[in-house]
Image: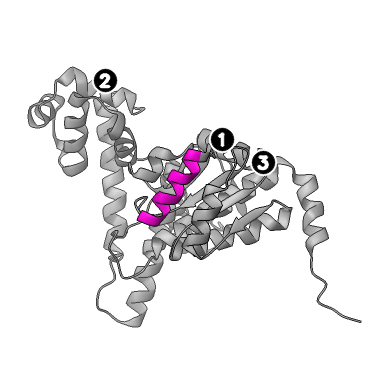
Amino acid sequence: MKFLYMISGCPCVPVDAPDAGADSCLFERNVLQWHERKLGWEMILLKSVLIRAKQYLPTASGAEQGALRYLLEHSEEIPQLSVKELSQRSFSSAATIVRLCRKLGFEGYRDMQKQLLFEIAVRTQEESKGNARVTAGSTSDIVYKITYRNIASLEETVKLVEPQVLERAVDLICRADSVLLFGLGASQLVAKDAYLKFIRIDKPCSCCEDIHSQYVIAKNSKPNDVAIVISYSGRTEEIVRCAEYLKAQGTPIIAITRFELSPISRMAACCLNVMASEELYRSGAMSSRIAQLNMIDILYTACINRNISQNVRMFSHNRLDTERA
């Protein structure tokens, strides 16, 4: 049996309900597992305290930044501190901290503490199941760690998606004469995936692996085009150069990048942020690539839904007949 579980106005999530016909011990265990799965969906759909704090930090006032930095750097201490103690440690006033909590969407300091405590407890529980870092271990350990890290990246990315920003990005794509895709390395693979998707709905696209060709495309872009610039760091020199050319041409930029201020995010008309649990200097893009591909899927599906009947006809028209007479 499936139950549709509604969370604070969010779309219903199908959850397997426990079977009451089973024996009592098995039923109780199934009930616990069922509630754990519901709890997992809630954590995915809710924005966490730490994500909200990171998001607000760049635009916070000087006094607020001190409190935010202490919160981010000493998050496990916060549930045990009074507002006065936190103000002393962060060199902020108690009134500033209370106002900050309300700006972050909480009723007050106590409400923020409760949510943070819950978040820390869930995170600790998840981390106890297995360290997401790639360390020495058996093949089965590696399977779990890599999979866990990719899942964590997707869950954190969901918390960063702002519906109004996504709507703005979809508007730009639907109105544009052409979609220009930019990326290097693993990000180029993501750009290629976007290219293969958008041509299926007859959206003119360009996607080149050669960086010099990307420079030329950027320099020849028009204000009625739209550029999707993909860079996890937001600082890749060649892609920043492409973004500068696009900006000079008046071409709106949709950036798919990590959640922080960067040269590319500053030039973007829309920033679709992704979260990934990996360093900028790494052995290879893993969870960041998965998060970027997921964002392309979200963007593409949202574009399809803008004109679903026409796009369904295009899918049928573009289907390749593999059977030959």
The first of marks 1 and 2 along the sequence is: 2
Q: Is residue 162 magenta?
A: no
- Residue 159, percent across and down? 42, 43
- Amino acid marked by disc 1: Arg
The first of marks 2 and 3 along the sequence is: 2
Check disc 2 and report the residue beneath it: 99
User: Circle 3 sits in a helix, a strand or a loop, which is it?
Assistant: helix
Q: Is residue 216 above or below residue 147?
A: above
Q: Is residue 238 magenta?
A: yes
Q: Is residue 65 above or below residue 314?
A: above
Marks 2 and 3 sit apart, C-alpha to C-alpha, by 39 Å
Marks 1 and 2 sit apart, C-alpha to C-alpha, by 29 Å
Residues at marks 1 and 2 touching, judged by CB atoms closer than 8 Å: no
Marks 3 and 1 sit apart, C-alpha to C-alpha, by 10 Å
Q: Which mark is residue 168?
A: 1
Q: Nearer the viewer, residue 260 or 230?
A: 230
- Amino acid marked by disc 2: Arg
Secondary structure of the magenta portion, mostly? helix
Q: Is residue 124 visible?
A: yes
Q: Nearer the viewer, residue 27 or 264?
A: 264
- Amino acid marked by disc 3: Cys
Q: Nearer the viewer, residue 270 or 124?
A: 270
Task: Identify which residue is drawn at 42% across, 53% down.
Answer: 239
Check disc 3 and report the residue beneath it: 174
Q: Which mark is residue 8?
A: none
Q: What span is in magenta?
A: 236-248
